[in-house]
Image: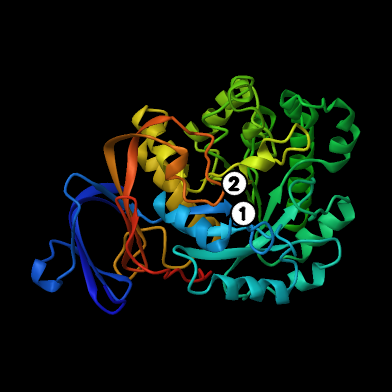
Amino acid sequence: MSQNSSLIIKNGNCFINGEFKDQDILIENGKIKTIGKVSHLNSSNVYDATGQTVIPGVIDTQVHFREPGSNDAENLESGSRAAVFGGVTSVFEMPNTDPPTTNLKEFNKKLNLAKNRMFCNYAFYFGATPDNAKELNLIDTLEGCCGIKLFVGSSTGNLLVSEEKDIEKVISNSKKIVSVHSEDENILLSRKKLIKNNDVNSHLIWRNEECAIESTKRVVRIAQKHKKKIHILHVTTKQEIDFFSEKRSNVSFEITPQHLTLYAPECYEKLKTFAQMNPPIRTKDHYEKLWHAVNSSLVSIIGSDHAPHTKEEKNKNYPSSPSGMPGVQTLLPIMLNHVNNNKLKFKQLIELVCENPCKIFGIKNKGYIKEGYDADLTIINMKKETILKNDWIQSKCGWTPFNNYKIKGFPVATIVNGEIIMENNKILSRALGKPLTF
């Protein structure tokens, strides 16, 4: 189907204006033209969505596609292919690449690398350093820039802003939202002695709850002082959830599907270093508190923190093994399974992965099924049962922590900019992703 032709989605149960309605959708030139009963005569391209659910395109606000740099584990093409296989139509990609995305030259290089290679739409984070605060002032209108990424604790890559004066400089100078990897570097360094060689269970002892909550309190205090918006990524502790239970102005946060599905010590016994990520997967009391945050609408976004490494790297003895796991392709299937298991309502999930990313980050013309909006849609069979397998994973790393998980609820088609990109686990189109606008 050419970009200038039309597409009709017939007989779908569509999520429109906060409720599910049996409607047809006419798409023309990449936009939603008409919602209602639409004649087949309006288009020769018809997708029959009988028995399927049509929702706004899913947005994953935290992925590492590793390009430039670790192209053996992932690149922009393979990561975006994994995204659309999982029903994801847009991603926010992270700056801790090699070289890092910390200046306009590297940012524009990444935009050029993405052009005509990414199957989903995309935006890139601009990485903060102790020395580029002035440049952060210049990116307010930068095409395809979703915000500033601030690592206040060390993780994969060499991006780190750990001194309070530098953290304050970054937050106070940014005109865009600052998203934070929140672990306290000084506490991390002081607790390094607790790392046990070849014992991945010591990972969550080293990177403990204090490391997370003290960092989060600090960045929130700085943000409120300067009246700036910040977004805390991959929150993992019950202490942080208690902290966020008191309304914090200009602050939002997200949780990963991994932290809502896995918990210690079982995950480390089963997956070993393949369960290792930063911040760590913690014990069941933290897992239960994270679900409390979902069900009490404290959390704003579910983001995957897709961070692939090769099997060879992950098989190294801890702590030589790198932290991170793939997740963009499994974000939606895992969360749909939670919906089917009554852990959360479908409407909640749509808020967390479609609507709220647009509200918080200011993405234009996405997140809703509305006439005139971009035709990014995810089509789901809520009754489809499947067993997730490593060989289904499209990421170059070729594995998932959810291998052999039986789930119910599955994306069956992904529509990006009005084109059916993926249907029934097959790519049907060339890469048509575009930079997001804000």
Disc 1 marks a residue whose amino acid type is His
Residue 348 placed where, x, y %?
41, 41
Disc 1/disc 2 C-alpha distance (Å) = 7 Å
x and y percentages locating residue 302 in the rendered image: 52, 44
The earlier-in-sequence mark between 1 and 2 is: 1
- Residue 103 lies left or right of residue 25; in this view the side is right
Q: Quadrant of residue 3?
A: bottom left
Residue drawn 67% across the image and 64% down it: 68
Closer-to-camera residue (409/137): 409
Closer to the camera, 52 or 315?
315
Tag 2: residue type? Asp
Q: In this view, does 93 lie above or below 301?
A: below
**Residue 184: which numbered mark, if any?**
none
Q: Residue 305 carries which label?
A: 2
Answer with left or right where residue 127 lies relative to residue 392: right
Assign a secondary structure to mark 2: loop
Q: Mark 1 points at which residue?
A: 64
Left or right: 189, with 72 as reference point: right
Residue 370: image location, x then y, percent = 31, 63
Residues at discs 1 and 2 in contact (Cβ within 8 Å): yes
Q: Residue furthest toward the bottom?
A: 4
State how the image is colored. Answer: rainbow
Q: Is mark 1 on a helix, strand or loop?
A: loop
Q: Could you classify mark 2 by the number of other residues whose Cα lies within 10 Å: few (under 14), some (14-19), or many (20 or more)?
A: many
Q: Which of 364 and 395 is in front in this view?
A: 395
- In the rendering, at what x and y percent does residue 232 appear? 66, 46
At 81% from the left edge and 41% from the top edge, which residue is drawn?
A: 184
Q: Residue at x 55, y 53 (%)?
A: 61
